[in-house]
Image (cartoon, rainbow, N blue to C red):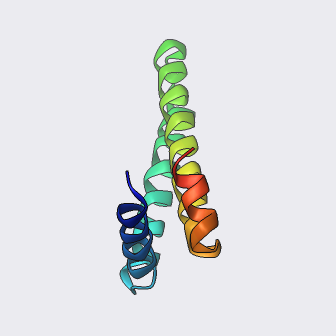
Amino acid sequence: MDNAALMEMRAALLETTATRGWSFFAKFAETIVRELESEAIAEEDDARAAGLRRDARGARRFKDELFKRVQIVRTQEPHEFLEVATD
């Protein structure tokens, strides 16, 4: 991805996170993860519960990493973003 495309991506992410809908998106993501965690806790079958816990942990990791990277984009200077995005 060239620098112009990366800068376009950064601008789009900044625009997206500045909308009123972004907070709802974040809340939806957290709600989904918590529902998966609750389902895993409530499951009585040990084998099924283990699979559900694995799914919930994966969902939590994905959500946390996604929002961490979005936050990086929001707070870094453009040249720093290029370094993070191209690693």
Which residue is most to the top? Answer: 47
Q: Please provide percent x and percent y for residue 13.
A: 42, 71
Q: Looking at the figure, which quarter contains the C terminus?
A: top right
Q: Is residue 73 left or right of residue 21?
A: right
Res 22 seen here: yes
Q: Is residue 15 left or right of residue 70?
A: left
Q: 38 and 66: which one is in front?
A: 66
* Quarter-of-image position of residue 15: bottom left
Res 71 seen here: no
Is 4 above or below relative to 42? Answer: below
Q: Please provide percent x and percent y for residue 67.
A: 55, 60
Q: Residue at x 52, y 35 (%)?
A: 58
* Quarter-of-image position of residue 6: bottom left
Q: Please provide percent x and percent y for residue 21.
A: 36, 80
Is 6 above or below relative to 21? Answer: above
Q: Residue at x 64, y 74 (%)?
A: 75
* Quarter-of-image position of residue 53: top right
Is 34 above or below relative to 12? Answer: above
Q: Please provide percent x and percent y for residue 83.
A: 60, 55
Q: Is residue 50 left or right of residue 23?
A: right
Q: Residue at x 35, y 62 (%)?
A: 5
Q: 25 and 51: which one is in front?
A: 25
